[in-house]
Every structure is written in structure tokens, then in C-alpha cells.
Image (spheres, helix red, strand yellow):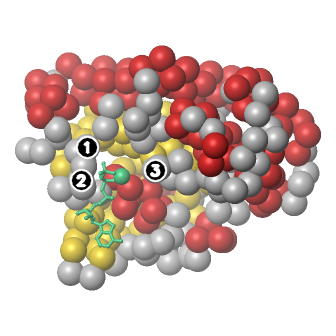
Amino acid sequence: MSAAANGAMLAVEDVTTAYGAIVALRGVSLTVGHGEIVTLIGANGAGKSTLMMTICGSPAPREGRVVLEGRDITGWPTHLIMRQGLAHAPEGRRIFPRMTVLENLRMGAEVLNGAHFDQDLEKVCALFPRLKERLGQRGGTLSGGEQQMLAIARALMSRPRLLLLDEPSLGLAPMVVRQIFAAIRDLNRETGLTVLLVEQNAYHALRLAHRGYVLVNGRITMTGTGAELLARPEVRAAYLEGGRA
Ligand SMILES: Nc1ncnc2c1ncn2[C@@H]1O[C@H](COP(=O)(O)OP(=O)(O)OP(=O)(O)O)[C@@H](O)[C@H]1O
Ligand SMILES: [Mg+2]
């Protein structure tokens, strides 16, 4: 195991992931330190969601390793990985549409078998007051922004040490995006929550993150602090032109 993997919250080492003949990740390596916000930016189809899903064990990588808090979890089934202090808010706000907001939040807390539920419910309601007013409403009838808040809140209900967020800003109005990014920043500052954030909205993501990686066609092409990456003309061009080299 590499030195980086030993000290990091998460280390992805030389990971190759394929869907049949389609190779989505080609030797991807990255680390996320304890208490860090790290962002992965890239265009449509670059492989961002595939990396998140590979970390969660489905699909499993064809080559390489995923190391969580020093433990090699490569090849573990997803349900076991989700019990290791990691939560995933997947792309597209995959909440349970027929369940109420409260029921969705209960699903998020399932890995804790209901421990601390009331206390944690209060915390996520304080973070997202709109959800508090809508606990009895069905998830599918929430607005897009509210569904995104619910997806994040549901992930937080499992008390993760590492939160994987896949495009939380997708399709949302700028004000809602700011609210959600502010919530992530506050959680990180106040609780030390470690975050791996996937975004196409490179500007906001790099301003929020301590460090970032740029993914182009399944390969990491650049890395640096958020500020460094924001200053790079290639990043600006890639962001404006959609991220393809
Ligand atoms: N289940 C699948 N079967 C086959 N190919 C897939 C599957 N899921 C993703 N791919 C392919 O893998 C590549 C990477 O997709 P992925 O969803 O990881 O990209 P992404 O960076 O998250 O893009 P976006 O910004 O559009 O969400 C794409 O070419 C996509 O078509
Ligand atoms: Mg995606």
C-alpha cells in the first residue's frame, strides 16, 4: 500500500473501470485527506459518476485499488462499503419519490439502525429549513432544488465521515446552488466532514474545494489547489468549452 493511501481518508490508485468494451476510467489515481473538500471536474461523459460508483463498489474496478481509511475495499460489495462511514448522494437526486421526506430520511439512517435519529433529523432540518416544513410531503412532489437538498440530507443521516456528492448543482437556480454549496462548506468547517464533490460547475466547485482534479476522457489531466486550478487558462477554456481537451 502506498504512503498516500495509508494516511488518506480515501485513495484511488490506478483505477481502470469499464462497461463491457467501453473503458470509462483509465488508470485514475486521487486522494482525499481527512477533513478535505476535494472536487473532481470534467465534461459530460468524462467518467466522474463512474469514479463515484467505482468507489462505492459498483461497477467494481477492472484494475487498481480503492483504499478507505487505510483499508483496501476493492471488490467489496456495495452494501458493506456503505457501512464503512461513506455516503453517496448520486447524480439526478435519486430520492424515493413515493416516500415522504421523513421516510426518505429514515432510509438514509438505516445503517445506524435508528440510533440518534431524532437528533440527526433536527440537524438536517436546521441545515435545510425547507425540508423541515415538508416532512410529510412525498419526495417526488418536491421541487428540483428541494429534492437535491433531500438527497444530501438523506446521505448525511448515515453520519458519514466521507460524503460523495455527484453534481449537487445540476439544473438548479444560482441561488439554490449557493445555498447548497454554503451548506457543504459549513458542514466541513463545523464537523470536519470530508467531501468528494463531482461538478461540471467548475467555478463554484473550485472556489469551495481545497483541492481539485480535472478528468478528461477517463484520465486525470491536472490537479492542484482550487485556486491554482481556477487560475489556469486550460481550466478556464475547458470549463467554458465543456471540458474536452
Ligand atoms: N452503465 C453503463 N453502460 C455503458 N456505458 C456507460 C454506463 N455508464 C456510463 N457509461 C459510459 O461511461 C462514460 C463515462 O460516464 P459517466 O456517467 O461516468 O460520465 P460523467 O463524467 O459522470 O458525465 P456527466 O457529466 O454527463 O454526468 C460515458 O462514455 C458513458 O456513456
Ligand atoms: Mg455524471
First reached walking from the N terminus: tag 3 or tag 1: 1
**Badge 2: few (under 14), some or many (20 or more) residues near its Cα, within 10 Å?**
many
**Quadrant position of residue 243:** top left
Q: Is mark 1 within 8 Å of ligand 1?
A: yes
Compared to residue 1, the image places residue 122 above or below, namely above
Residue receiving disc 3: 91
Q: Nearer the viewer, residue 68 or 100?
A: 100
Q: Secondary structure at mark 2?
A: loop
Residue receiving disc 1: 42
Residue sitting at 43 percent across and 65 percent down? 54
Return the x and y of residue 167 as percentages of the image width and height.
42, 41
Residue sitting at 21 percent across and 81 percent down? 21
Q: Secondary structure at mark 3?
A: loop
Residue receiving disc 2: 46
Q: Is residue 226 visible?
A: no
**Quadrant position of residue 171:** top left
Label 3 or label 1, whichever lies nearer to me, is 3
Compared to residue 225, the image places residue 212 above or below, namely below
First reached walking from the N terminus: tag 2 or tag 3: 2
- Give the residue type at disc 3: Glu
Label 2 or label 3, whichever lies nearer to me, is 3
- Give the residue type at disc 1: Gly
